[in-house]
Image (tube, helix red, strand yellow):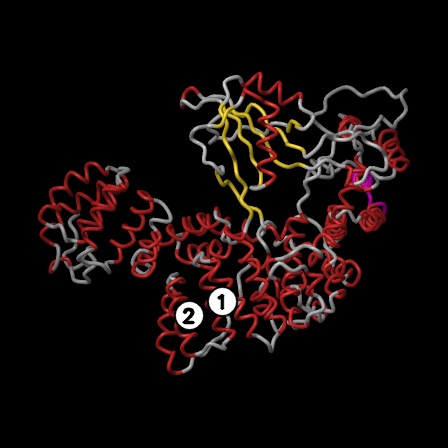
Amino acid sequence: MPMDPYTICPCGSGKKLKFCCLSISTEMEKVERLIDNHQPRMALQILDKLVKTNELNPWVVTRQAASLMSDDRAADARNALLMFLRHRSDHPSANALYAMAMLQADGLPEARKAIRRAFRFSIAAEPVIVAGLAQYLAEYHWQLEQFMATRQHMVMALQLGNENQRQEVLQLLMEFDADPSVPFVFRGGQTIPPYTPPEAAAEAVNKAQRLASVGCWGDAATQLTASAEQHDPGSANLWRLIGLFRAWDGDEAAAASALHKSAELDTANFESAVETEALAQELERNVPDNCTKLRTSLYDTDMVSRLLTKLDESPLLVKIPPQPAQENEQQPIAGIYAVLDREPGEFRPDVQLGDLSRIIGRITVLDSNPEKALPPRALTTALEGDKLQHTKSTLESVAGDLVRHALDDTTEGQVIGVERPDDEPMTFDYYMPKAIPAGDRRRLRRTFLNNCWGDGWKTHPLRAFGGKTPQQVASDPQAKMKLAAAIDCLEAVADDMSSLAPIEAIQKEYGLPAPTAIHIKDDSHLQSLSLSQLRRVDVSSLSDEQFRTVVQRASMARMGRLTHRLLKTWVEERDAAFKDNDERLMILASLADLTSRSLHDQEALEWNAQARKVVDALPNSFERVVEWKLRELQLQLENQDKVNSLFRELWDVYGAKLPRLRKILGGIVEELGIERPWDQGIVSVAGDTASLWPSSTPSDAPANQKLWLPGNG
């Protein structure tokens, strides 16, 4: 059907088709049908003729570019659009397509400027394309671990995308906000400070706000910085706004600088200053130039099997179990080895952390890939400096003439990651041989964690203090705000380690003021709080529904200390709020898991005991009793007598009804490397292990329910 001549012209002029591009409408209708039918080459045959006489017609040029990209000719699309944009630099569709074409042809960061222009000119006309660009930038920043830029671009894509895009981005955003490896100050969004500019700066600030509203945060920050320096240098809120815009643009060094300045100026609100300073410290710690580089050096080898034999024989190397092959793996992995600083000693019952060898680096041996003409190789990976040199020396001394430096390797090795020096005391690099019993492993890890939260962190130089330690600045009143922020950063590290650090005790030791409670006005107020602010909510005044909202936000964000405090409050002060015993047991299980992961075994046992009281009072609770006894078994690993007693009880009393349980117990014993505690006279149960329950299912077995085991979910 011919196009209505009185419809708005597709070229974007705003005129009716009859008074604009009617002369080419018949041919362009054919083009549109071919594009809709996924026939870009047929469309290009028509467009190539039209463009000769209509090289500046937006309808022709944009459809030509779209067809070229569909035909995997992004560079040609980019070039065609560039010629057009020299004459029509503000055309919305052309800018959006040019950014997409440049992204496909050149990638990032080369396409960054074009994407900014698309944000500025194309949001209204091409929201779906701009949403795709924002999502691509979000994933790009995530790879660089520029977390504030990642999240803000996700939010932008969520606001602009179509339904399919929104669903995909929402899933990514939920994964991001639940990722404890991302410091909590970066997750859940940041509070935008209110700011009223002086009259002389109003025009510049309004322009910056318009730029920020379309995702041009770097340009907005530049405008605001000039305004701040000239008209309002003492505004904490303005510098915080500049810092947020810089961080959302991915310029973390400049963001940290602005946020430091904001925190120093915010003398009236200690908590606000601490939150801003914590953002600054996390951003500054994340700048690559402030980190230690993880480097890989390449070696050629001609004899993989002989090399593996040599590496297997060395007491300074420990073979790491192979991981499943990845889809994008270029070469098959023949072997991976941890490099130790010294030979492991013999196990003794009183072994201490200082007795253990430490892992310095890694050696990876790759098989050849004839299809891709990739030769066999050995790779050494370690932090630059002494550790990398030690790892390389170990390979060279063990392998001898079986390896030689690869000619295509760089002198210093390729950078494949970074490590933040501030986090060095919290890095567990001890090698624990299999001969060390599970109970001793827990004891040693507990010692390590106690060291982390004790002298490990307190006596370690931090960038925020100019290379001084928390212990050294603790007595300086001027350092209180920075110290409180550094403790927030420590809490974020603890969350990543799934550990409950004694944050309140550290704050009290250093004489920091107790946090000012936030009293919730309404539900919208509660939802608007940042995760940092959520920790200060006065939960005693919350309704049960509001309390559940706080618990849900804290647990979804995997904030261990806050979640632990809230769940304890629920059990000890809001018991009547439980919907039923299933919910009560779920909360007790969460508390037991939180404390067990932190190796607070005594507290975990107490939660376990409370749950057992609930379970014992329930009808048909046979399987639930088994679940909680298995939990107790995990927590009693340092008490060999109790472990043996629990094993025998599970085998004798419960194994008779649950044949598969005995096989599970046998697997646990094998994994722990201990002797079978049950009587040797017991006959092993054979038969089908596909189901936990035998064919004669007892009446108290829950229908369609599998046995829960610690670590299985």
- Please state the horizontal and vertical placement of residue 249, each as a whole percent of the image: 43, 58
Q: In the rendered image of this protein, does residue 423 appear above or below residue 674? A: below
Q: Earlier in the sequence, mark 2 or mark 1?
A: 2
Q: Which x, y percent locates residue 599? A: 77, 46
Classify residue 118 as left or right of residue 366. Answer: left
The quarter of the displayed image where residue 369 is located: top left
- The residues bearing labels 2 and 1 have C-alpha atoms spaced at a distance of 9 Å
- Regarding mark 2 in the picture, which secondary structure is present there? helix
Q: Position of residue 575 (x, y in %)?
A: 78, 60
Q: Is residue 533 above or below residue 348?
A: below
**The image quarter in which residue 638 lies:** top right
Closer to us: 280 or 371: 280
Residue 225 is tagged as 2
Q: Is residue 625 magenta?
A: yes
Is there any visible trace of residue 624 in the rendered image?
A: no
| Other-residue count near label 2 (Cα within 10 Å), few / some / many at <14 / 14–19 / ≥20 | many
Where does label 1 land, which residue?
258
Q: Amino acid at mark 2?
A: Thr
Camera sees residue 631: yes
- Circle 1 Cα neighbour tier, 10 Å, few/some/many (<14 / 14–19 / ≥20): many
- Taking the image as shown, residue 697 lies to the left or right of residue 274, namely right
| Residue range of the region highlighted in magenta in the rendering | 616-633
| Count of numbered marks | 2
Secondary structure of the magenta portion, mostly? helix
Residue 361 magenta-drawn?
A: no
Q: Are marks 2 and 1 in contact (CB under 8 Å)?
A: yes
